[in-house]
Structures are given as structure tokens and as C-alpha cells.
Amino acid sequence: MLDKLSVQKITSNDLLECRNFKWETFVNNYKIEMFKFSLIFVILLFLLFPISFADTEIQRNPQTIISNDDIVNFSITTDTPAKIEVICNGTSFSDNYLLSTSHTITTGKFSANSDVNCEVKVMNNASEIIRTHTSSDKPLLNFHVYSKQPVLTITDNTIEGSFTAEFNKPKGSQKTYAFEKSFTIKNDGLLPMQTVKITKSGDLSNWTTVSQTEISSIQGLTESNDIIVRVEIPETAQEKTYQGSIKITSGNAGEKTISFSVRVIYPVEVEITSIKSDIKDMLKAGNSYESKLNIKETMGYKGTGKISVSSSGFPNWMNAEGINDISNINAGGETTITIRVAVPERNVIPGKYYGGVTLSNDYIKDRDSSSYKFNFEIPFPKMSVDKTIFTYTIDPGNKAGEKFKISETDGYTPIEGLVISLTNCKRTTKQGREESFDGLKNWIQFNGIDSYIKQGNSNDVSVSINTNKEYGTGEYACDGKITTKYAGEKNLNIKFILADVSITETLNKLKDLESSATNNYEKNIISATKTLIEKIRTDIYSNDFISPYTISFLTSTLKIKSKTNVNDYNEAYKEVENMISQKNSISDLKNKYGKYKTEITDIEKNVDVYFKEIVGNLLNHFKNEGDRTKDSNMLFSVEQYNKVLDLCGKISCENKGEINNTISELNNKIISYNISIGQNKAKINTLKDEISKLLFIDPFGKNEKYDDVINCYADMMDKREKIGGDNKDAEVSFFKTEKSKIEEEKTREVTMSAAGLLITMLVILSLLYAFIFGHKVYNKDKKNVELVKFLFSK
């Protein structure tokens, strides 16, 4: 067995490698743990012994206001011995780098009106900087040096500079042009400023005033004086630029001078007014118009010089004239110009025009008064066509046509670019199939067309139709369009029928209805419709012609009448809506066929009266039915009354309130009956449960409760019969069946109870008999005798 085993030899190198591997792992783990321990130790050390940073105490003398005459020194104290260096505005100061905790550094004097920024360096024995202090952490290292002597300062100066005195009112109404400015005198030194004098000079000195001319003294830093300067330029001054100055002098602070200038400008304004103007409102083609304008210089200071006259809004084709420049208008003077325009007879462009004349030069401002507006209108021409619908009935191969008139009716502008074209040509066969028929354009011709119609004039145009006998019966139509440049468009409708037979068919239908007419309303409607057809048969033909509606109305009427005869009022009631639809359609046609309004109104009047009569008959029927059945079939009665209310919405009724009250009473009664039926059902269940608990030997008790159940069913049958409705017969039949079952059960149970009682009585009697006749007793004589003899013995 051992020979078959494969044993691997383990060498010493293998053992060494294994040993080395374990040692390296141990060392690495040890290093990691030591690093963690060291890190934790350092953190705890910082937490337990926080580092405290040293600070430096710095004092400055003087502590507050410093002048250029003051010697500045710093007293510096440190917590440990150190060397100190103070640097102010780039200059270094020290106490020869003594190693001490207390130092006094003298920086000396500084220039007046200067800002001083210092820094303090704290160093160790090796002159290494430990820390540096600046004004960010020691504010007293930053300070301003004032002048000890008074310093004259001007602030808030609004008078220095150039100004414009522009007069804006007519001469004589504005005597002066005035404005006010100001400046402030301050003393930026520490000592008082003595005897300040304010003087004027220059061209403007006589027109300038100041609020103060002398100030005795001004204290340093804290005191200031506001000086108001007022300048008033008289209207007599020349138009030029004037110079002025104000000098401020102090006995111990020197002087300052403020210079300013004022430019005097006089305005020029012109005003345009109309003396007479025809260039307004509506202008007529072929006429000329003019406007006379007065131009006046209104300010009165000086002349205008050359004035440019320009126009706007006048189209080139109006040939505006009189737009010429003006050489000059003296101060307060005036002149006249005339503007002319001509409206040509042709090639006129209508519209509203907003023209104008504007005056301008270097002096004239853009004001409404320096321009004149022309608001005028070239009206758009108005085109009138006396006939736009052309309808004919033509035998195939024959001709038809007529003249119509195209007019310009406004009288201002001609109609130009007039063209008549045909589009959308089609035909409709007798079978009602509509198809495009572009060849119809060759049948229709327009003659006498003039593309130009002078305003107020008219043009006679004729339309002619040459039919082709090869084409059969049908309706032929084209849409025509009259187009112009500015007069808009007019639509034409050309329609004709070739050998139409449908009108004859309509008349035949009316004839059939006439034969069945039974009253004057029907006869009047048919007669009025026939009259209308005869009147318009050669003038118009359309599928929505009046006769189909009349026929439909009469057909509905006949349906209602026939339904009424067989007492089927519900079907007649449904047909009323169709009658209303056709009646409304007849009324709507009055707007569509306005020229036949009288004839259509005649039909409509008879239709309306006849409709009210028929609906009134239906209404009376449903009212009678409701009255007849309100005590025997309440649901049916409510239904009839609701139909009455519906019909009352179609014709006026006087008793709607009474009917509403009756419906409300019936609904309340139906609810009451239904509640009673439910109560009877519950009572029956209770009685049946009580019957089942009674002994068979109590036939009289059972009989009474059976009678109560039977009475409940009888009451339910009566109330359900009176309620009526679709399920009435089924429910009444069910109650009747249940009542019969109870009656049978009553007979059976009562009979069985009576028989049981009789048998019980017989058994009791038999037992008594056996007891009486089968037993002996002792009498008073102490003899043993039969019980019966004992009972009946004396």
C-alpha cells in the first residue's frame, strides 16, 4: 500500500520561506498599530494642552488728533523679551533692537494732511520675525495728520463750470433768467481761520449776488459755511457767453478762486396757422385743392434767418406745389405761403393721408407750432351691383340672359381694374349627383365690361347663356366674381335649370295632399305653397325650397290625425317634434328668401295656427287621460300630466300651476302607498311567524291572524292597482296568488285544528265514560255500588 502512495518531499527552503512570510506579516501589522497609537496620542496632547499664542500691547501718543507739529511715539509691550521694529509709510524706526519686553519707539513728525500707515514687527534674538501687527488688528497704527495752521477748503461746489441761460418765453414776459448755485467753505486745519472775504469779478459781477460777503472766523475741522450764489441775466443782455469769478480770501489761510461762465441764448419760434385750407376731409379725383398758411415768428427777440420748408405725406402723384424755403422772418414778423395739390382722374390710390408742412433751421425747435398737419382722405370707391343672382329655367338649346348695372356710388374715386371671371362651374343631375363642369364657362358670356368707371357713374353689363341641347335635365351653376383694384369684390351666382321636372313633381305631391285635406288650415297651407311655387318657379330653384318643408309639415299632420283616429296618442305625441322642426324651418326661410317674405308669412301663419290646434287637441286628450286615471292608475296619470306640461311649453297654457300641483299630490300619494305596501309586507312576515307558533288546538286564534294576513294582501293589491305602472299586473297577480295560498292554508289549518279538537274531546269523554261506568264506590250505607249509580242516586 505504501508503495502506491505518492509522498511529496518538503525541503528546508520551503520551511524558511514559510517562516519569513509570517515574520514580515507580523512586522507590517505592528507598524500600522504603532502609527494609529501615535496619531491618537498627538490628538490627545493637543486637546489636553492647547497652544497659547503670545500677544503684543501697543499704545500711541498722541492718542486722538495728530497735527504736523506733533511728535508721534509708540509704547510697545510684549509677553516675552523681543526686538521691535516700527515701519510707517515705508520708513523704519526701532530702539536699536534691544531684547526687552517694553519698548518706546519715536517716529517723529509727519506732513500735514497726510494719512500714515504703520506696522509693528516683533522679532526674537536672532532677528527672526515672530509676528507682525498692522491696522487690521491694531487700528491705532493707521492715523491722519492734520495741519495745525488753518487750511481753506472749498467743497460741494456747484457754481464752477459753464451754464446756459436760455430764454423760453416771448420777449417782455420774461424779464430775467435766474438760477442759483452754491459752494461750502471749510477749515481743514486745527487753528481758527480768520476774516474770510468773498468778492465777485468779471462780466457777470453786476448780475451775481452771494449770500455772504465776509465771515469773521471759521473753526478748524468742525465748522463750515454754505454760500448761495444767484445769477440773474436781464433780457436786455446780448446773446453771447459771459465770464465771472468768485474769490474767497482768508487773512491766515490764503485764497481760492471759483470761475464760471454763462451763455445767453434767445429763442426763435414760428407758428403756422391756416388762413384757408381746402386740403382736408375727402378729396375728389380730378380736382385741385389749396391751403394758405400764415407763418409768424412769435418770440420777438431776433429774426429767423433762412427757414427750410419741407412736406410729408403727400404722394408723388398728387403733384404738391408751393413747398419753398423762406429767406427770413424778422423778430415778431410774419409771411404767407400757399400749398396746392391735384388729384388725378386715373391711377388714384385711395386711403387716409396724414400730410404736413414743417419749418426748421438751427434756431427753430421741433414743436407742434412749427408744423401744420393735413389730414385728408381719398375715399375708396364703392361698387354697387344691382343684381348678383341670376336664375333661369331654360329648355335645352335655348338662350337666356339679362342686363345688370355696375355703379360707383360714393362719387369721389373711380373704379379701376374691373374684371369679371367665372369659377366653380358645376352641374347637378336629376339624380342629385354633383360634378364639375368647366365647359359651362363657354355657355356664359359677359358683354359691355369697362375696366374704368368714373366716380358717380355706372356701366351696363349683359350676361347671356347659350345652352347646349345635347346636355340633359339638371341644375347648372357657376360662381362669378367682379374684382377691382380698390373697390373690393362682388360675388355673382348664375344658376339655371334645363327642362326641370321636379317642380311639377312637387305640385303633384301638394295635389295629393290637397285631396286628403279635411279642414281650411290644410287647404290654406297647400294653396299658399302652390301660389309661391308658381310665382318663383322661373326665378329660383333650390333643394331647400319652401315646398319640401310644407309637405313634411303636412305629412306629420296627417300622421298625427291618423294616429288619433286609432287612439294611438303616444305616437302622435312623438310626431309633434317633427312638426316643430318643419315649422321652424319654414320660419327660418323668411330671412333666406326675403323677397318672398309676404308669401312665406302667409304659409307660416296658417302652419302656426294649425299646429296650435293639433297640439291643443293632443294636450286636451292627455289632460283628460290624466284626470280619468289619477285615482285608478296614478303613474299613468303622472305620465299624461307631464306630457301636458311638455306640450304647454310648445303652446301657451293657462292651467300649468294646477297641473304641477296635481302631479305633486300624485307623487306624494304614490310614495305613501309604496310605504304602506312595505309596511304590509313586514306585517305579513310577523303574522306568519306568529301563526307558526300557535297550537293546532287554537283554531280561533289562527283564524284571526290568517284573516289579518289576507286583509294585508287585499290592501296591497288595492294600492298597487291604483299606483299602476309597467309592473303593476305582475305585482298584483303575485299578491293575488299569495292571498289565495294563505286562504287555502287557512282553510286547511283551521279544519285540521277543529278535527284535532273534536278527537281530543271524544278521547276525554271516552275516558270519563270508562271511569264512571267501570268503577265502584261505597255509599252512605257502606255498600259497594257502581259509580254511575252512586252519582245518580238520591
Image (tube, helix red, strand yellow):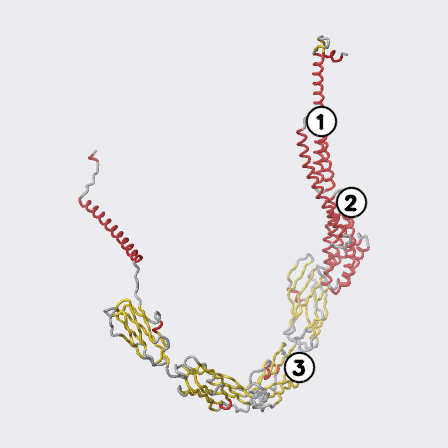
* Left or right: 628 in relation to 88: right
Q: Position of residue 591 (x, y in %)?
A: 72, 63
Looking at the image, tell me whether mark 2 or mark 3 is earlier in sequence order: 3
| Looking at the image, residue 633 lies above or below residue 95 | above
Res. 628 mark: 2
Residue linked to disc 3 = 286
Residue linked to disc 1 = 699
Is residue 461 visible in the rendered image? The answer is yes
Q: Residues within 10 Å of mark 1 (few under 14, many from 20)?
A: many
Looking at the image, tell me whether mark 1 or mark 3 is earlier in sequence order: 3
Q: Residues within 10 Å of mark 2 (few under 14, many from 20)?
A: few
Q: Secondary structure at mark 1?
A: helix
Is residue 157 visible in the rendered image? The answer is no
Looking at the image, tell me whether mark 1 or mark 2 is earlier in sequence order: 2
Q: Quadrant of residue 690?
A: top right
- For the C terminus, the image quarter is top right
Q: Residue at x 21, y 36 (%)?
A: 5
User: Between 122 and 734, which is closer to the camera in this rendering?
Assistant: 122
Residue type pointed to by label 2: Arg
| Looking at the image, residue 143 lies above or below residue 6 | below
* Left or right: 525 in relation to 408: right
Q: Quadrant of residue 533?
A: bottom right
| Gap in angstroms between the C-alphas marked 1 and 3 | 126 Å
